[in-house]
Image (cartoon, grey):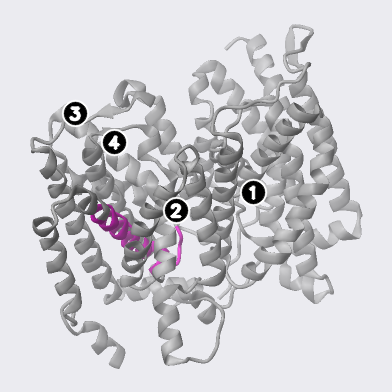
């Protein structure tokens, strides 16, 4: 692999990785506060892509505008679903909660197929195929935009988690739910808010996914696999870890597709996923789960 | 101890009705040789057998697998390849294909079951997709998206279904006997201890990792074997057909609906739900039938999880004995669900 080609893969990998980081952030945040894998996370992202596609086709609304429109909608829906359904169950039984999110994923997939058919779709804007050259490197505009939007949103999330009292409460709940409750954090409310933020991020990532990739209802199985690889490599519940892992895997994916074959690029995620689980189940930035008797 | 005496005593079925049911089902093809009913019953047996298998892991040990169809699909492919390349008939290779699935299950179990936590859900969830991707990408062996055609069985058209009917029935009988044997063994007690409180189970000497891995390996044997038979039944495999998500979903719903962790729970679930869903599929316009079917099953799963998490049998038992009201599902009762950070 020539240095030029490697530099090119690096650029594409980092730009794609930025969006992966955004998609994984919601998943790892929800796991952090609830200790539940939201199986429906990728299905919700794909739902965002479909909604953005419809807004674009019928009302001419640019996908970047629909990012702004979808965030409050998904925030509200996330809060509603968490408060109304998930929370009641999650406090009783984590296994059943996972099954419930599995059910949500299936419902979303079926709905998308019934509404938008199961054929491939993509959001093609006027600037979809634009690109420019930076020295010898080829930079597609949509990838740059989606990475930029992702970074802005992730920075916002970071600031919120680090500097606000809500952020402190969320971090406390992630670290130790019982202790957080003992020092006066309303963990149920914090859980609902965190879940809603996670879903809102999924909604924001939807239009970006739709601009960069083709999608169909069942694509969420591919994406949940990629996202799980990212959050497991980064350490479940760790946002910083998810960011680093997203970049690493974004680059690894590009390198694989150039050096081996495009078909095999998704496989690199699973190689990492299974490898990490064997070698270091807590991931790069995770903590070893203590087992209480 | 009284419990031990109860567990040790009696050959599998003390009551007569399961044997009577078996004799009836054995006679069906002689009395009612119509393809439609045999087909319906055969698929019911297939789902029931796989659900009983799923329940060994999901019900006894309390670890829900989201990837059983991965083993079903790989079983289909393995049987198809053995037949196409080596000429080995599926009815002979099917149990061996199941063993291959078990080995693979043990491997995945080794990756994901040595610790507690979400690794098992993650691995089983992604495994199906990996398996499907592999079958799609290994074009030279599997034919990629073209799929593989299997030679037909040398039987008159109206009799072709009969060996599959008895094959799936045999699989179901084996599943029930294995499930009963596990339920009455020390191994089964260990699995239930894991479900109730894994920490305490480990502290009291249960080799939890080994038990879980073994349970998973047994659990997927049924999916692999059923997949092998199913491939020959259709005479065809392709990546979409072999890894149909609906299969995993059906197993989960059937086990939950009937009652998890009870031998007859998944059987009851399959015998009620499969014929029902086969009938309901006719009512939906075929243009959207697949999608609506999927969404409807998702809704059923969410509803069962919310309103009938204990399943029919356990709910009925609870209602009959009028035990003190405890709305929590079974595994939450004995254990303290506590997350540590």
On residue B77, the disc is 4
Residue at (41% x, 55% y) in the render:
B250
Compared with residue B126, is residue B118 higher up or lower down, i.e. above or below?
below
Measured in 3D between alpha carbons, the distance from the residue under mark 4 to the one under mark 3, in whole angstroms, is 10 Å
Q: Position of residue B231 (x, y in %)?
A: 25, 39
Which structural element holds mark 2? helix
Measured in 3D between alpha carbons, the distance from the residue under mark 3 to the one under mark 2, in whole angstroms, is 30 Å
Would residue B53 be counted in the magenta stretch? yes
The verdict on a common chain for dots 1 and 2 is no
Compared with residue B160, is residue A102 higher up or lower down, i.e. above or below?
below
Residue at (57% x, 59% y) in the render:
A100
Q: Quadrant of residue A137?
A: top right
Q: Left or right: A104 with respect to B67? A: right
Measured in 3D between alpha carbons, the distance from the residue under mark 1 to the one under mark 4, in whole angstroms, is 35 Å
Measured in 3D between alpha carbons, the distance from the residue under mark 2 to the one under mark 4, in whole angstroms, is 21 Å
On residue B249, the disc is 2
In which quadrant is the N terminus of chain A drawn? Answer: top right
Measured in 3D between alpha carbons, the distance from the residue under mark 1 to the one under mark 2, in whole angstroms, is 28 Å
The verdict on a common chain for dots 1 and 4 is no
Secondary structure mainly formed by the magenta segment = helix
Compared with residue B158, is residue B271 higher up or lower down, i.e. above or below?
below
Q: Which residue is mark 3?
A: B84
Which structural element holds mark 1? loop
Which structural element holds mark 4? helix
Would residue A198 be counted in the magenta stretch? no
Q: Which residue is mark 1?
A: A235
Earlier along the polypeptide chain: callout 4 or callout 3?
4
Q: Residue under mark 1: which chain is it in?
A: A
Q: Quadrant of residue B341?
A: bottom right
- Classify 10 Å Cα crowding around label 2: few (below 14), some (14-19), many (20 and above): many
Q: Residue under mark 4: which chain is it in?
A: B
Q: Is residue A203 visible?
A: yes
């Amino acid at each position: 692999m020539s240095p030029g080609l490697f530099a090119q893969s690096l650029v594409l990998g980092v730009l794609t990785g930025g969006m992966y980081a955004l998609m994984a952030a919601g998943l790892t945040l929800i796991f952090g506060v609830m200790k539940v894998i939201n199986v429906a996370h990728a299905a919700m992202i794909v739902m965002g892509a479909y909604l953005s596609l419809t807004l674009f086709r019928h009302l001419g609304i640019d996908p970047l505008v629909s990012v702004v429109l979808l965030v409050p909608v998904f925030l509200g829906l996330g809060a509603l679903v968490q408060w109304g359904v998930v929370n009641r169950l999650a406090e009783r039984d984590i296994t059943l909660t996972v099954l419930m999110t599995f059910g949500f994923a299936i419902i979303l997939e079926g709905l998308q197929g019934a509404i938008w058919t199961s054929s491939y779709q993509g959001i093609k804007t006027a600037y979809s195929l634009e690109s420019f050259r930076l020295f010898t490197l080829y930079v597609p505009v949509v990838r740059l935009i989606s990475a930029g939007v992702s970074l802005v949103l992730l920075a916002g999330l970071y600031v919120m988690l680090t500097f606000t009292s809500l952020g402190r409460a969320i971090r406390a709940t992630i670290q130790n739910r019982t202790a957080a409750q003992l020092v006066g954090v309303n963990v149920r409310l914090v859980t609902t808010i965190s879940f809603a933020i996670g879903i809102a991020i999924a909604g924001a990532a939807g239009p970006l996914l739709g601009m960069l990739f083709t999608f169909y209802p069942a694509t969420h199985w591919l994406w949940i696999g990629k996202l799980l690889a990212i959050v497991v490599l980064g350490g479940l519940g760790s946002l910083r870890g998810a960011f680093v892992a997203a970049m690493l895997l974004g680059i690894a994916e590009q390198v694989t597709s150039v050096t081996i074959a495009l078909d095999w690029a998704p496989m690199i995620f699973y190689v990492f996923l299974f490898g990490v689980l064997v070698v270091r189940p807590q991931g790069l930035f995770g903590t070893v789960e203590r087992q209480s008797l | 101890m009284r419990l031990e005496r109860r567990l040790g005593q009696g050959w599998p079925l003390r009551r007569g009705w399961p044997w009577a049911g078996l004799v009836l089902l054995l006679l069906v093809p002689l009395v009612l040789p119509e393809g439609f009913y045999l087909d319906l019953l055969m698929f019911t047996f297939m789902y029931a057998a796989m659900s009983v298998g799923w329940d060994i892991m999901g019900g006894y040990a309390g670890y829900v697998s989201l990837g059983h169809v991965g083993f079903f699909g790989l079983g289909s492919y393995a049987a198809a390849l053995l037949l196409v390349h080596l000429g080995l008939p599926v009815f002979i290779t099917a149990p061996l294909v199941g063993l291959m699935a078990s080995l693979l299950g043990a491997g995945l179990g080794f990756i994901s079951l040595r610790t507690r936590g979400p690794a098992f859900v993650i691995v089983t969830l992604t495994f199906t997709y990996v398996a499907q991707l592999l079958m799609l990408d290994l074009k030279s062996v599997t034919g990629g998206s073209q799929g593989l055609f299997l030679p037909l069985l040398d039987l008159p058209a109206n009799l072709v279904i009969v060996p599959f009917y008895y094959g799936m029935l045999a699989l179901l009988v084996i599943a029930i006997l294995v499930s009963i044997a596990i339920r009455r063994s020390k191994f089964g007690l260990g699995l239930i201890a894991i479900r109730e409180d894994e920490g305490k189970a480990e502290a009291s000497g249960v080799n939890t990792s080994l038990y879980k891995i073994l349970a998973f390996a047994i659990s997927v044997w049924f999916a692999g074997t059923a997949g092998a038979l199913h491939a020959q039944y259709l005479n065809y495999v392709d990546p979409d057909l072999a890894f149909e998500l609906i299969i995993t979903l059906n197993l989960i719903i059937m086990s939950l609906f009937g009652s998890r962790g009870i031998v007859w729970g998944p059987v009851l679930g399959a015998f009620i739900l499969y014929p029902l869903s086969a009938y309901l599929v006719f009512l939906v316009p075929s243009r959207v039938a697949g999608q609506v079917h999927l969404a409807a099953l998702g809704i059923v799963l969410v509803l069962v999880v919310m309103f009938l998490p204990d399943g029919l049998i356990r709910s009925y038992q609870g209602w009959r004995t009028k035990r003190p009201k405890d709305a929590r599902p079974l595994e939450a009762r004995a254990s303290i669900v506590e997350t540590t950070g």
